Image (spheres, rainbow, N blue to C red):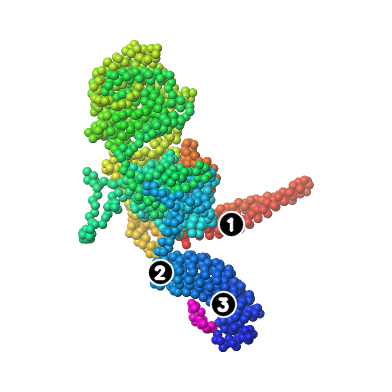
């Protein structure tokens, strides 16, 4: 090879000196001075120094110094084809060198001077004697081209990989046997030449050369190339000839490069799978699951809670949590490959997250990174930081997103919406939970709070969330209770996002939290989590979101003919399913339970992988014979279970299993088994034991019941001594505990009944035709359970009514299905009934009110005669009349107000018709001024007269004093309705008492005394009997067949013997009150309801009742169960029986900071009415609005002292009308008419101007500037006419006909009209017309009034023009106020705040009460701009004028504050100066008579004053400097504030 030939692989065209010229420049291999001078002269012109082909053996230091001095700025040094063995260090001072050519010399190492050249980009050292590339090559950071071909290289130092800018690397014709693996990190390398070496393998990391386009490896010893090379997507040229490649790889390598790369990809996949199978532990098949035993690389994740388990990229990540055995938090990160099943504890670099639990984590499948947000650290401080873990670099990175940050929180829910977006919902913060919704843009790294609408989920934590087809699904979670609801949020349109509660059917999951939600092909899957009691949920559930869609397994391909037919004829649209009435039936998503095939495990963590597999970590396995470690500090998740979710089959639920579980039975069993351990120790004894008096009473009622069964074999057995919640038999009368609570709201009948109906959750009887097996105490029902059946409701209500003086009884009988199941869908809502009654009464009063004026009453009246009738005679006469009146006649006396619109309930469709057992309350007349005896339905609080009740029979009744059996024919069982019931309990021919001989006592009001409220209750003095309770159904039901034996039964019962020596109880026929069996003391304590429970109002703070075309909802007012938006009542009326089409929606609010108290939405015309209490913003009383049509606003005049505004009526874009009251200028009316066409033209002109300005700015700016949406401020609407009306002043000295009544400013027609009031005796009014062209027309009603002169007319016209401008300015202020009101309402609805009155703060629990946290109060950062910006709706920016006003206001406020501070300092300085001058003048005046002590005092005072003056002068100077700096800093801060971006 000739030395003048270009090197292989290098570009040609590089000029060099000819050999003849070179020989003239050297003498015996030494460069002479003249030749060097010529070379330097040529270099100074070309910028290149060429000393090639001179056979130089060395370049001396002196010559290098001359080169540095003669050509310091050369960029290229050519020393090819010499005999150089090294280069002097002085050449390293040529800092401008970019290219050095050292080919064909005798260099054995890289010259040290190369490391001093910071700009060196091209180094050519081919044909030298290098045996190794040492680590110094790493210092050539700017190097892009490196040629080391034709050397004797054996090794290359891994430091070469630090040449990050290297693009070309030539290592051909060397003796290399291997390359360092680090070479794969050279991402910018494009050309790599390894030809003619001794390489047998390439490192697998060569796949990291992502920019490689040409690779030369021919003439080596390769038997195969790394399969990882298949990932080199940019490789275009590959030469691997003359190697030892085997078939089929050899043929593939000789073919197209793309085909060979595909072959290598397949080989890599095959090798990976083989390696996976080789390393994967042996699986144990357990049903649809594969169980693997986890291996340990270092240590495994010890058991923990509140951690995050995240799957992604075929790995599972376990981060943080609370360690179970230590009770401390950790920030450990464990990773396992789902192919190898090996636990690896990572030790990542970077800034690690602090120890925490309760955080949320998501794996970004697009960027292959783990994201962790929030949580709670070891100091119990809640966090809102965001961290990112990169598995490739094994490094944590703290992210700092832009925008407003979510508040610090724990237990939030996070999911990935799409490739570049994460969503965050809810969580628990300091003192409250959240239900806000956030977007995290991963591309721009920015948080954005979403503005959502609709029925949002309650603030909650630990909810399950997932994204599916542009929608977000949120399930369950924990607020004040554990929920099981499902919400949907459509995020396809970010401007209009509505929350929707998904109504489902089927068997839903239990109330749960901390679980997972996953979506596959339009179906939701739920796994893991904990139930209400904290138990582990081992069942899986699925929900088909589109049940009407055809299953995939049914969509099979048909024959070819069918396919052709489908092409010819379009597919028929399936017809919607319709009901019998022709209306479409809504197909609701249906829950189904999956066969999870798993059992309870000590600790299990669940996750969903990206390939739709469910991954479970657990401790031990029965199938694999692995037992959990006995030491908690050694217990970790040692078993992993895998299963495809789609392989889990849905269980077929039997009808018996699908029936709701009787919760009362579960509660009773729990209390019985635990022997009442949950009860307070002071009252527990009465629940679990029987006193001697109770034992005697139980023996007596047992005898009574035996005789009753003998004489009434076909009737229901008496519920005399049912077991209580602890399984102990108690006389049912002692279960009624008269109690008077401290709440005065419960002292009347109707409020008390309504409280019981709302406060308790109704549960139907387990067997609808049998009484309950046990009767718990009202103490437990009201205090702990807050739920029960009709018997529990009735006993609780009866106890409260007796306690406040009512004569109340618990009734047991029969009722229709609608009553027993609390189905009120056929009833009118009581609230609507009361409104209808009130409206009818008002209309009736209006009709009765005579229109004629009443005559003046005479002052003379005739005295009425005195009534001398005896009151006792009247009472006896009334009793006789009542006895002789037939019962049937009472039916006509039933007031119509009690008759509800209930259809005939005795339908043949009910197989239990007439046999459904029920309990209700009877309240007799007489006590508490009760005018008539009524039935009270405790489940609905409805009141029925005896002869108009829906009940179908009454068996017996009782209260705290006795038990009575009904023996009246025609009233006991299977009667159409009870209409002839006699409630005179003294009549023993109709009522059989258990405790015979007990006189009916007057019901007193219970007086609560602190000393009298013993734990076991007060002992009563009434006597009574009792019997055993049998709940077996009669063998042969009949219609009162043995009622005729009533007298015989009563005689047998009353002829029993007295108490004998053995203690047998009997009743003597001649017995009196004193001789009757003593009534045992009540075993119940006084009933107590906590204030917070009373405020909760309804079960769990929410109760929904469905009526006829109406749904009524109640919410708690105070306490932890109250809603975050202050909603306490909601009433929705519908136009159809299915309650789908809303007619009207009413919402009642309390404790709102914005003073909103009621909202009504009428869906017929979309009218929205909002009512406010006193103290609302802008003094608003009511707002009535029809969107895009009109709005009418009512104001509290007392809150509008500035303008005395009463109403404001807006017809959008057309008209604005206001009314006033009590103004000083006597204006009562103002109207503005707008010009819609003129307004539209003004808007178009403003838009065109803004677009032109934007286009001009874009043309003058950078060429690649990103186009922005054109924003402009809409001009105010164009006013066409303004009208004012005035009232006549009272006691005014000005005559009425000279007082202005109306002023009309017709701007469109350029005229002004003034009307005056009617004067006394005039039928017309004075009127003045003024025109802008200078003409006028004046009509005076009084001819005596002087006609105004021309000057007076012009002066009045000028004054009216000024008034016109003033009114127009006021109108613009009104328009701005309207805009502010709208924006303020939107802001108030986005950030609802509730008030806590001082007298309720002590009883309102915060979310932190159960926490041991002692967090320091976090100072809310002061927003310097907030007081000066108008309310901003999320997603809307400030206009230019608003931003300018906010900026100027902020700067002016600071300026005024600084000036005030300076004035304060100057004032103090002036006072000190004046005091010093005064003191000196006094000294000069009295100097001759002053004592030495006084002179010393003067000098001391002068020194002190001088010191203060100097200090104040320094303060003033420093304040001036600080003021300038602060003003400039604030101005710069405002310029950078994104909210004022409109000014940029």
Residue 619 position in % (x across, y down): 46, 45
In the picture, measured across the screen, residue 1535 lies left or right of residue 469, that is: right
Please tell me whether residue 5 belongs to the stretch shown in magenta.
yes
Helix or strand or loop: what does disc 3 sit on?
A: loop
Task: Indicate whether 1396 appears above or below 1544.
Answer: above
Q: Residues within 10 Å of mark 2 (few under 14, many from 20)?
A: few
Mark 1 or mark 3: which is in front?
Answer: 3
Helix or strand or loop: what does disc 2 sit on?
A: loop
Q: Residues within 10 Å of mark 1 (few under 14, many from 20)?
A: some
User: What whole-number distance in Å separates the C-alpha atoms at marks 1 and 3?
Assistant: 71 Å
Residue furthest top in the image: 1070
Residue 517 or residue 1225, whichever sits in front: 517
Give the mark, 3 or 2, whose residue is nearer the N terminus: 3
Q: Which residue is mark 1?
A: 1523
Q: Residue, x 52% and y 68% (percent of image)?
A: 179
Could you say which quadrant of the image residue 941 lies in?
A: top left
Q: Residue, x 35% and y 19% (percent of image)?
A: 702
Helix or strand or loop: what does disc 1 sit on?
A: helix
Q: Which residue is mark 2?
A: 247
Q: Residue, x 24% and y 54% (percent of image)?
A: 573
Residue 681 or residue 566, whichever sits in front: 566
Residue range of the region highlighted in magenta in the rendering = 1-16
User: What whole-number distance in Å separates the C-alpha atoms at marks 3 and 2?
Assistant: 38 Å
Residue 128 bears which disc, if any? 3
Residue 1215 position in % (x across, y down): 34, 52
Mark 3 or mark 2: which is in front?
Answer: 2
């Amino acid at each position: 090879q000739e030395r003048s030939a270009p090197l292989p692989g290098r570009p040609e065209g590089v000029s060099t000196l000819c050999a003849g010229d070179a020989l003239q420049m050297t003498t015996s291999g030494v460069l002479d001075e003249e030749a060097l001078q010529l070379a330097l002269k040529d270099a100074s012109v070309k910028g290149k120094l060429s000393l090639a082909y001179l056979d130089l053996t060395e370049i001396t230091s002196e010559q290098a110094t001359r080169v540095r001095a003669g050509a310091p700025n050369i960029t290229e040094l050519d020393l090819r084809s010499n005999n150089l063995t090294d280069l002097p260090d002085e050449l390293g001072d040529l800092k401008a060198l970019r290219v050095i050519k050292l080919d064909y010399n005798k260099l054995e190492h890289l010259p040290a001077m190369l490391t001093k050249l910071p700009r060196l980009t091209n180094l050519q050292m081919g044909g030298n004697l290098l045996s190794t590339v040492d680590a110094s090559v790493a210092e050539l950071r700017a190097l892009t081209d490196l040629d080391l071909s034709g050397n004797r290289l054996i090794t290359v130092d891994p430091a070469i990989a630090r040449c990050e800018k290297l693009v070309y690397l030539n290592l051909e014709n060397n003796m290399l046997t291997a390359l360092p693996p680090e070479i794969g990190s050279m991402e910018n390398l494009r050309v790599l030449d390894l030809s003619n070496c001794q390489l047998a393998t390439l490192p697998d990391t060569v796949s990291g050369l992502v920019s490689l386009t040409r690779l030369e490896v021919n003439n080596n010893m390769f038997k195969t190339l790394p399969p990882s090379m298949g990932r080199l997507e940019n490789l275009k040229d590959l030469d691997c000839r003359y190697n030892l490649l085997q078939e089929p790889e050899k043929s593939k390598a000789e073919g197209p490069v793309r085909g060979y790369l595909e072959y290598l990809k397949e080989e890599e996949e095959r090798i990976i799978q083989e390696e996976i199978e080789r390393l994967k532990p042996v699986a144990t098949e357990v049903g649809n699951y594969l169980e693997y035993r986890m291996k340990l690389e270092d240590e495994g994740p010890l058991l923990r809670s509140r951690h995050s388990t995240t799957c992604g990229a075929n790995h599972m990540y376990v981060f943080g949590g609370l360690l179970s055995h230590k009770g401390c938090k950790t920030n450990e990160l464990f990773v396992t490959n789902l192919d190898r099943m090996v636990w690896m504890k990572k030790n990542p670099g970077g800034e690690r997250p602090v120890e925490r639990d309760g955080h949320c984590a998501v794996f970004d499948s697009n960027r292959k990174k783990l994201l962790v947000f929030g949580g709670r650290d070891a100091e119990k401080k809640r966090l809102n930081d965001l961290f990112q873990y990169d598995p490739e670099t094994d490094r944590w990175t703290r992210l700092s997103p832009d925008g407003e940050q979510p508040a610090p929180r724990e237990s939030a829910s996070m999911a990935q919406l799409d490739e570049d977006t994460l969503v965050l919902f809810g969580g628990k913060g300091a003192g409250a939970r959240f239900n806000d919704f956030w977007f995290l843009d991963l591309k721009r790294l920015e948080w954005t709070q979403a503005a959502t609408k609709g029925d949002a989920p309650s603030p909650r934590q630990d909810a399950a969330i997932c994204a599916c087809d542009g929608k977000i699904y949120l399930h369950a979670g924990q607020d004040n209770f554990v929920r099981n609801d499902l919400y949907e949020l459509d995020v396809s349109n970010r401007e209009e996002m509505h929350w929707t509660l998904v109504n489902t059917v089927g068997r839903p999951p239990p109330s749960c939290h901390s679980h997972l939600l996953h979506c596959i092909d339009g179906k939701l899957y739920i796994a893991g989590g904990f139930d209400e009691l904290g138990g582990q949920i081992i069942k899986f559930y699925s929900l088909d979101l589109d049940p009407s869609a055809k299953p995939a397994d049914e969509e099979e391909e048909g024959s070819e003919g069918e396919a052709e037919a489908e092409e010819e004829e379009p597919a028929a649209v399936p017809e919607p399913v319709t009901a019998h009435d022709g209306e479409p039936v809504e197909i609701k998503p249906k829950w189904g339970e999956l066969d999870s095939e798993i059992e309870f495990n000590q600790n299990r963590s669940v996750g969903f992988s990206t390939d739709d597999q469910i991954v479970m970590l657990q401790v031990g396995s029965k199938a694999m014979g692995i037992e959990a470690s006995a030491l908690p500090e050694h217990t970790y998740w040692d078993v992993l279970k895998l299963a495809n979710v789609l392989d889990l089959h849905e269980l077929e639920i039997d009808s018996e299993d699908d029936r709701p579980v009787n919760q009362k039975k579960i509660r009773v069993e729990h209390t019985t088994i635990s022997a009442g351990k949950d009860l307070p120790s002071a009252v527990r004894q009465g629940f679990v034991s029987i006193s001697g008096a109770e034992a005697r009473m139980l023996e007596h009622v047992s005898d009574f019941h035996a005789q009753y069964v003998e004489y009434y074999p076909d009737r229901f057995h008496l519920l005399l001594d049912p077991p209580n919640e602890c399984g102990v038999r108690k006389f049912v009368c002692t279960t009624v505990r008269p109690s008077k609570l401290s709440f005065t709201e419960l002292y009347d009948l109707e409020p008390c009944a309504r409280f019981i109906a709302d406060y308790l959750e109704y549960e139907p009887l387990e067997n609808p035709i049998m009484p309950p097996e046990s009767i718990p105490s009202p103490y437990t029902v009201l205090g702990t359970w807050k739920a029960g059946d009709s018997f529990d409701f009735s006993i609780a209500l009866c106890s409260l009514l007796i306690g406040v003086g009512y004569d109340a009884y618990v009734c047991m009988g029969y009722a229709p299905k609608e009553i027993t199941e609390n189905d009120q869908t056929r009833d009118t809502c009581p609230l609507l009934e009361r409104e209808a009654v009130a409206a009818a009464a008002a209309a009736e009063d209006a009709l009765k009110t005579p229109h004629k004026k009443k005559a003046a009453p005479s002052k003379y009246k005739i005295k009425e005669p005195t009534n001398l009738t005896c009151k006792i005679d009247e009472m006896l006469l009334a009793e006789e009349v009542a006895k002789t009146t037939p019962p049937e006649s009472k039916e006509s006396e039933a007031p119509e107000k009690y008759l509800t619109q209930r259809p005939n309930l005795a339908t043949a469709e009910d197989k239990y018709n007439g046999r459904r057992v029920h309990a209700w309350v009877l309240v007799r007349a007489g006590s508490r001024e009760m005018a008539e005896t009524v039935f009270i339905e405790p489940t609905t609080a409805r009141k029925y007269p005896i002869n108009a009740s829906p009940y179908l029979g009454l068996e017996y009744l009782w209260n705290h004093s006795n038990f009575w059996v009904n023996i009246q024919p025609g009233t006991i069982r299977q009667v159409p309705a009870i209409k002839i019931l006699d409630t005179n309990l003294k009549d023993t021919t109709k009522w059989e008492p258990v405790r015979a001989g007990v006189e009916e006592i007057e019901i007193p009001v219970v007086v609560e005394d602190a000393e009298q409220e013993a734990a076991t209750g007060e002992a009563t003095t009434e006597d009574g009997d009792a019997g055993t309770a049998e709940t077996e159904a009669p063998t042969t039901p009949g219609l009162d067949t043995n009622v005729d034996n009533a007298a015989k039964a009563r005689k047998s019962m009353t002829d029993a013997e007295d108490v004998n020596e053995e203690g047998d109880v009997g009743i003597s026929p001649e017995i009196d009150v004193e001789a009757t069996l003593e009534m045992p003391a009540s075993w119940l304590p006084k009933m107590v309801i906590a204030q917070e429970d009373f405020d909760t109002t309804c079960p769990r703070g929410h109760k929904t009742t469905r009526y006829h075309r109406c749904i009524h909802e109640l919410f708690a007012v105070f306490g932890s169960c109250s809603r975050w938006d202050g909603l306490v009542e909601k009433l929705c009326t519908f136009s159809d029986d299915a309650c789908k089409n809303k007619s009207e929606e009413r919402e009642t609010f309390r404790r709102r900071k914005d003073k909103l108290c009621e909202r009504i939405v009428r869906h017929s015309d979309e009218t929205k009415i909002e009512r406010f209490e006193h103290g609302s913003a802008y003094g608003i009383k009511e707002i009535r609005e029809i969107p895009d049509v009109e709005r009418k606003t009512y104001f509290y005049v007392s809150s509008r002292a500035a303008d005395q505004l009463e109403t404001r009526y807006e017809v959008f874009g057309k008209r604005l009308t206001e009314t006033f009251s009590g103004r000083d200028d006597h204006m009562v009316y103002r109207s503005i008419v707008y010009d819609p066409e003129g307004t539209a033209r003004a808007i178009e002109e403003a838009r065109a101007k803004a677009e032109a300005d934007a286009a001009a700015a874009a043309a003058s700016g950078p060429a690649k500037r990103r186009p922005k949406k054109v924003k402009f401020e809409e001009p105010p609407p164009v006013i066409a006419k303004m009208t004012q009306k005035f009232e006549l002043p009272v006691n005014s000295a000005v005559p009425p006909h000279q007082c202005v009544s109306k002023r009309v400013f017709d701007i469109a027609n350029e005229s002004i009209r003034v009307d005056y009031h009617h004067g006394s005796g005039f039928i017309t009014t004075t009127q003045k017309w003024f025109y802008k062209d200078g003409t006028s027309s004046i009509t005076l009603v009084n001819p005596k009034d002087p006609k105004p002169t021309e000057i007076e007319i012009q002066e009045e016209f000028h004054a009216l023009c000024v008034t016109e401008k003033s009114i127009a300015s006021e109108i613009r202020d009104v328009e701005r106020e309207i805009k502010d009101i709208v924006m303020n309402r939107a802001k108030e609805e986005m950030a609802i705040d509730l008030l806590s009155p001082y007298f309720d703060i002590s009883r309102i629990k915060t979310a932190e009460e159960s926490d041991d946290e002692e967090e320091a109060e976090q100072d809310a950062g002061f927003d310097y701009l907030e007081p000066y910006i108008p309310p901003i709706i999320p997603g809307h920016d400030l206009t230019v004028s608003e931003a300018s006003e906010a900026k100027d206001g902020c700067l002016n406020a600071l300026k005024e504050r600084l000036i005030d501070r300076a004035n304060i300092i100057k004032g103090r300085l002036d006072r000190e100066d004046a005091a010093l001058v005064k003191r000196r003048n006094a000294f000069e005046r009295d100097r001759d008579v002053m004592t030495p002590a006084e002179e010393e005092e003067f000098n001391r005072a002068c020194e002190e004053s001088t010191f203060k003056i100097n200090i104040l002068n320094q303060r003033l100077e420093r304040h001036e400097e600080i003021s300038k700096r602060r003003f400039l800093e604030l101005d710069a801060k405002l310029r950078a504030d994104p909210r004022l971006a409109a000014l940029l």
